[in-house]
Image (cartoon, rainbow, N blue to C red):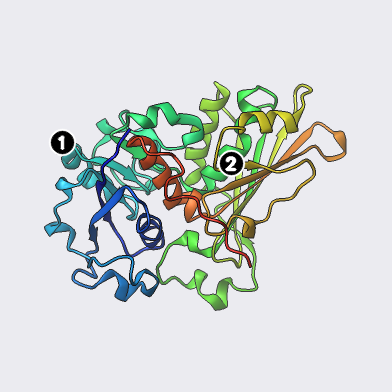
Amino acid sequence: MQTSKIKVGIVGGTGYTGVELLRILAIHPSVELSVITSRGEAGLPVADMFPSLRGYIDLSFSDPAKSDLASCDLVFFATPNGIAMQQTRELLTAGVRIIDLAADFRIQDVATWEKWYGMTHACPELLSQAVYGLPEMNREQIKGAQLVANPGCYPTAVQLGFMPLLEAGLIDPQYLIADAKSGVSGAGRKAETHILFAEAGDNFKAYGVAGHRHLPEISQGLTNMAGKSVGLTFVPHLTPLIRGIHATLYGRLNKEADLQGLFEQRYANERFVDVLPKGAHPETRSVRGSNQCRIAVHRPQGGDTVVVLSVIDNLVKGAAGQAVQNMNIMFGFAENTGLEIVPLLP
């Protein structure tokens, strides 16, 4: 059990996942924040960019080229895809443990990764070393990991919803449907027309129907759960919310079972997965700002289709909160340290 504080660095502290990491780590009793980098904002006090952190974070952003990341015990990469892989080999050699919140190490097959992300992988030899950071599935591997690939937001909600059914072999793995909706913060903190208030507000649309980058990540995880290849239709949607993901999942039952009991038993010891009572309908606002995933399982009209409703905050359980959960596991802290955050309502 780790008792002293660990030195933590954050690469890319100006995005939504970066500031969410700062919000959580600022009050984590076992963390000393030592480096927060930003190429564009080097020298600017963090609290000047994010006034919500005044009185909690006294550091300034530093130039990543001049930052002493090698002296950290752990470095979080809260950067766009393709950045972490450029620095990972050097940091691992220096004995630094890494959690990447982007997609650089999530997909084990390099050809698949390069196809979906449109770039050559800088360190494909490290993909087999990376541990996929979904604690409810890989907790034991995460404990000893040097490199953790933090799951995407859609993949977290979808995999946690399907997991009990696939592990128990209760649904046909060839006919899986994930109909998922996300708030606009999932697109990141950048200026793009489609996420302007006047474009995304009072509007609702599907996107990426022909193929979304999270599809191979989700399929990889579901295949591991089922022990065989899966057939998945994944359709994401953009909603006029700031935070939140709602995944409605459909599977075809192939045997009888107590579905409510199955989910309650599977997640009985999981602090951050809440199985709601039979007949419930989880809401995104019930998890806002927290590391919770709330799930309800239904069997409409007693037919052969099971419907799972899964909600998370895309920036917390879907990103920064899950990253801190992984850090806690890696360093032997209680898994809920710094994450006992009551959701915000209204």
Kindly identify which residue carries mark 1: 93
Who's the residue at 54% across and 21% down the image? 227
Amino acid type for the residue under numbered disc 2: Val
Left or right of 326 in this view: 261: right
Kindly identify which residue carries mark 2: 273
Image location (x, y in percent) of residue 307: 73, 40
Who's the residue at 25% across and 67% down the image? 58
Describe the element under mark 2 as helix, strand or loop. strand
Amino acid type for the residue under numbered disc 1: Thr
* Structural distance between the alpha carbons of marks 2 and 1: 35 Å
The 10 Å Cα crowd at callout 1, few under 14, some 14 to 19, many 20 or more, is few
Q: Quadrant of residue 109?
A: top left
Identify the disc placed on residue 212. none
Quadrant location of the C terminus in the rendered image: bottom right
For marks 2 and 1, give the one nearer the viewer: 2
Image location (x, y in percent) of residue 202: 65, 73
Instruction: Give whichever of discs 2 and 1 has the lower sequence position.
Output: 1
Who's the residue at 78% across and 40% down the image? 278
